[in-house]
Amino acid sequence: MNKAILFFAILFLCDYGFSQPAGYVNPKPTANQLVWQNNDFYLFAHFGPNTFTGLEWGKGTENADVFNPEHLDCDQWCRIAKAAGAVGIIITAKHHDGFCLWPSKFSTHTVKESKWRNGKGDVLKELSEACKKYGLKFGVYLSPWDRNHPAYGTPEYNDVFVGMLKEIFKNYGPVWELWWDGANGEGPNGKKQVYDFARYERVVRKLSPNTVIFSDVGPDARWCGNEKGFIGTTNWNTLNTAGFTPGAGAPSADTLNTGNIYGKHWIPAECDVSIRSGWFYHKREDSLVKTPDQLFEIYLKSVGRGANLLLNVPPDTDGLISSFDSAALMEFKKLRDESFRNNISKAGTGYFVSERKKIVDKKLNDGNSLTASSIARPFSQTLSIYFATPQKINCIILKENLANGQNCIRFKILISGKEKQFERVIEGSTIGHERILTFPETDAENISLKIIQQKGDTEISEIGAYLISPELAEK
Ligand code: FUL
């Protein structure tokens, strides 16, 4: 390359704070992943023999009759999910004990073998229909680890697993999200299975191309690396997966927690966490249901850091969500509503400010995270909200338009009070789908966002400002 061109190319990249290794292609989400990331809160329902035996990992030798939820009412689950502001429910169709909540012809350990409704019951049918009725998305967890199936540990088991996938997708779809647990323990014959995830994926893609497939390493959504519901303050939607597999072969928990800045694939994170200490309902844990404040903290550290939140609310032995859990969920919803009802930034004027121009940008604070705003470029350009009179705030929500990839590496927010008498500086790494930042109450006349370093042009779709309860802002 001509030296002069090289010089100007470097200058150009430096000026815009672009930072990318040579030859790097910044991944973009599929349309489907973008929609999924906009549906960021939904429920998990761990339900099966463990609900009745008090175990977390059933052995697979349980008598099918232990499963007997006499008052099962999936409409009740859906009403509660809806009222909690969740967009859907993912059910454990089969956990590690191998018991199938639908009458699968690939197993002899299913609802059909139980005395529940004289063997005529079908939880997947009831839940998928109830979800349709209430406008909720229906998702399925299907554990590849199976402690009951006699074929587990042999190549035939992969046919069994594929057969089960086909039954589920054909009879109960559409399936919004499919959840693969990476656990790979021993089966009844003491052998471990060699999972054929590539084949499972091909089957699902063919049957249902719009289903989001979750596992530790995707392909569409990844695990956040812990079961606390916390994603990293640095959270890249990009991940390197070459040489990794779900389960023991996954990248380290730390890597899953932050993603890879220059990862090759778009695999956003999902935080799974239980409202109780265990995943299944146990009466002994009725007093251990997380408080609304704890749930709010989880929300700040999952959705508020650009991940999706999958909150487990396990139905009880009656087949109902217990009043302990639903009460906490309703209060949690109230906290979110009260906190984020009043976007104070709407009372201000949004500007795109460069050295030479100051342009009003109505999209910056229109409350619509899908309208991309002006591109923020480092150093000389800022996105700002000005208030005619200072406003008390302790929370700022940033949103990055991800359609062209995730670009902001580091940002800085300057909040200044009346006539710039003081300034609060908040620095952070990564914005992503949503970034909720909390800080002590501040009188703001101006809020300015500067991008310090980026992969490519950062498109900010929203700068929101809120005054939430001080206790919650401290989380
Ligand atoms: C883990 C399982 O072993 C737990 O029982 C639970 O289902 C959790 C969501 O995933 O890998």
Image (tube, helix red, strand yellow):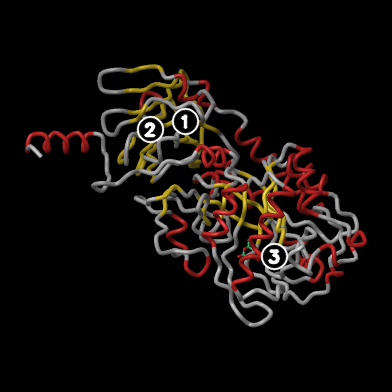
In the image, farthest residue toward the bottom: 190
Q: What is the quadrant of the N terminus in the image?
A: top left
**Residue designated by label 1:** 463
In the image, farthest residue toward the left: 3
Mark 3 or 2 closer to N-term? 3
Callout 2 touching callout 1 (CB < 8 Å): yes
Residue at image x 71%, y 53%? 168
Residue at image x 80%, y 60%? 103
Front-most of 89 and 463? 89
80 left or right of 154 in image: right
126 left or right of 307 in image: right
Residue type, label 1:
Ile
Discs 3/2, front: 3
Discs 3/1, front: 3
Label 3: few (<14), some (14–19) or many (≥20) C-alpha neighbours in 10 Å: many
Residue at image x 43%, y 54%? 258
Kindly identify which numbered label has been placed on residue 449. Answer: 2
103 left or right of 298 in image: right
**Residue designated by label 3:** 95
Q: Residue 155 location, x and y as percent?
A: 59, 72
Tell me the CA gap for discs 3 and 2. Answer: 46 Å
Distance from mark 3 CB to nearest ligand 1 atom below 8 Å:
yes
